[in-house]
Image (cartoon, rainbow, N blue to C red):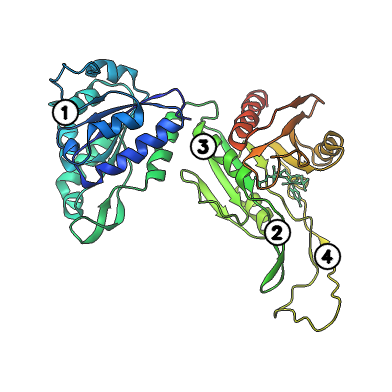
């Protein structure tokens, strides 16, 4: 999480400079202290005042203007930075950094910092493809810079090509990954399942449930941001696919089981937040069922229990959405499925369970301990669960 981290956001002179305002805004909203450093040409595209209002912080654009009460010395910024991000990064700044030239505030900060540096290039497609730019980027990569490749699309010249600033979500994801690379889940491989599986009845109907995928996605993103290598196995949801992880889309319980079994080798922990169908129609109609008869009987048969049938030494975390005897029922499932941790989800509480942004859960451990959590956002619940996962993995 960027919370309480100092992020130096460098902005250079590109038409995409206005998009940096969105990056600054999102990082600020997530609790980061965003220190903006603009090159003089960046100020021709977007004003320092805009960035200053968004971040609530001084904006540095002129190395020699010390009249502003907010003027900050480059060494102090370089030392305070948890990460330096240059978005958009022009061919010019890339060339200067590759050559080790420090002639403005931004290049001085980059040369003086020990923090990781991320570059998100944005430029004309020919400039980007030019071997000089490519060589410079290669050189910087070798020196440990992280490059967020530009996207393909419409460029300011009117042409279509590779050179557009990468999607903001992708840049934010890379920032979080870089910030979290020394997190407590560093080097861990974690598989998360999310969403509600669907069991087809005929070509247009299915048996499903109300899972939105929010809990599972929050877990996958939180694990990614704490340094884990994450695989998200997702049943259908309306959520955008998260970046910075492997995402496998499935529909049925059987497909989810096959996906879990396929990726499991070398995995440290499996967290099953998905609401998995326990039954599926014994027969799938090849054509849409017509309403000819007054009643229709569906015969259902059991699906495999993914968690219960799992073998191996990995840490297993389950969820139990319960509407009565929450702790008792969740404990029974923990034992039946031989889990290390069960997240008992009280779905009778307002704002808890399916499709809400918040959740009210209790954590039940294998040794019988129970930890009740207050109503929290799903991201906060995810962080609490991962605190336990990290310490259980330490002793496993
Ligand atoms: O997606 P959201 O809208 O954010 O909602 C989140 C949630 C309510 C779906 C989630 O927090 C939750 O509680 N998920 C578990 C739902 C449930 O009731 O699971 P269960 O009691 O049927 O199963 C217990 C555990 O076994 C679960 O981890 C489940 O993934 C797993 N299971 C279940 C059936 C099956 N055939 N195979 C399984 O592995």
Disc number at residue 100? 1
Residue of label 3? 224
Measure the C-alpha gap from mark 3 to mark 2.
26 Å
Q: Residue at x 75, y 31 (%)?
A: 362
Q: Nearer the viewer, mark 2 or mark 4?
A: 4
Left or right of 116, for residue 324: right
Secondary structure at numbered mark 4 = strand
Front residue of 321 and 146: 321
What kind of element bears circle 3? helix
Horizontal and vertical percent for residue 261?
Answer: 66, 50
Quarter assignment of residue 160: bottom left
Badge 4 or badge 3: first in the primary sequence? 3
Task: Tell me whether the residue at label 1 lies in contact with that at label 4, contact meaning CB atoms closer than 8 angstroms.
Answer: no
Q: CA distance from mark 4 to mark 3?
A: 38 Å
How crowded pointer 4 is (Cα within 10 Å; few <14, some 14-19, many 20+) is rated as few
The residue sitting at 57% across, 55% down in the picture is: 238
Quickly name the residue at label 4: 300
Residue occupying image coordinates x 37% and y 41%: 171
- Image position, residue 138 (x, y; %): 24, 41
In the rendered view, would you say 330 is above or below 288? above
Residue 336 appears in the rendering: yes
Q: Which residue is mark 2?
A: 254
Mark pair 2, 1: CA separation: 55 Å
């Amino acid at each position: 999480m960027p919370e309480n981290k100092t992020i130096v956001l460098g902005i250079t002179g590109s038409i995409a400079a206005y998009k940096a305002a969105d990056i600054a805004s999102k990082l600020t909203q997530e609790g980061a202290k965003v220190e903006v450093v603009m090159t003089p040409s960046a100020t021709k595209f977007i004003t320092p005042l805009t960035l200053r209002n968004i971040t609530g912080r001084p904006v540095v654009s002129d190395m020699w203007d010390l009249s502003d009460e907010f003027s900050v010395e480059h060494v102090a910024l370089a030392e305070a930075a948890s990460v330096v991000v240059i978005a958009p990064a022009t061919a010019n700044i890339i060339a200067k950094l590759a050559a080790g030239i420090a002639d403005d505030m931004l290049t001085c900060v980059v040369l003086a910092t020990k923090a990781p540096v991320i570059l998100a290039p944005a430029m004309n497609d020919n400039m980007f493809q030019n071997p000089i730019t490519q060589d410079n980027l290669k050189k910087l990569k070798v020196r440990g810079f992280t490059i967020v490749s530009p996207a393909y699309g419409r460029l300011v010249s009117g042409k279509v090509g590779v050179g557009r600033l990468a999607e903001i979500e992708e840049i934010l994801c890379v920032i979080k990954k870089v910030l979290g690379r020394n997190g407590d889940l560093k080097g861990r491989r974690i598989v998360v399942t999310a969403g509600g599986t669907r069991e087809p009845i005929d070509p247009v109907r299915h048996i499903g449930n109300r899972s939105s995928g929010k809990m599972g996605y929050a877990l996958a993103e939180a694990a990614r941001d704490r340094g884990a290598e994450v695989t998200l196995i997702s049943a259908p949801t309306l959520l955008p696919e998260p970046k910075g992880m492997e995402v496998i889309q499935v529909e049925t319980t059987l497909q989810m089981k096959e996906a879990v079994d396929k990726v499991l080798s070398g995995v440290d922990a499996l967290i099953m937040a998905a609401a998995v169908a326990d039954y599926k129609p014994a027969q799938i109609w090849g054509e849409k069922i017509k309403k000819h008869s007054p009643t229709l009987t569906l015969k259902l048969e059991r699906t495999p229990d993914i968690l219960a049938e799992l073998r191996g030494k990995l840490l297993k975390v389950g969820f139990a959405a319960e509407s009565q005897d929450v702790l008792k029922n969740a404990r029974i499932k923990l034992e039946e499925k031989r889990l290390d941790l069960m997240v008992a989800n009280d779905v009778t509480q307002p704002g808890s369970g399916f499709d809400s942004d918040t959740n009210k859960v209790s954590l039940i451990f294998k040794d019988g301990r129970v930890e009740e959590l207050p109503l929290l956002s799903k991201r906060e619940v995810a962080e609490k669960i991962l605190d336990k996962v990290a310490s259980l993995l330490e002793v496993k």
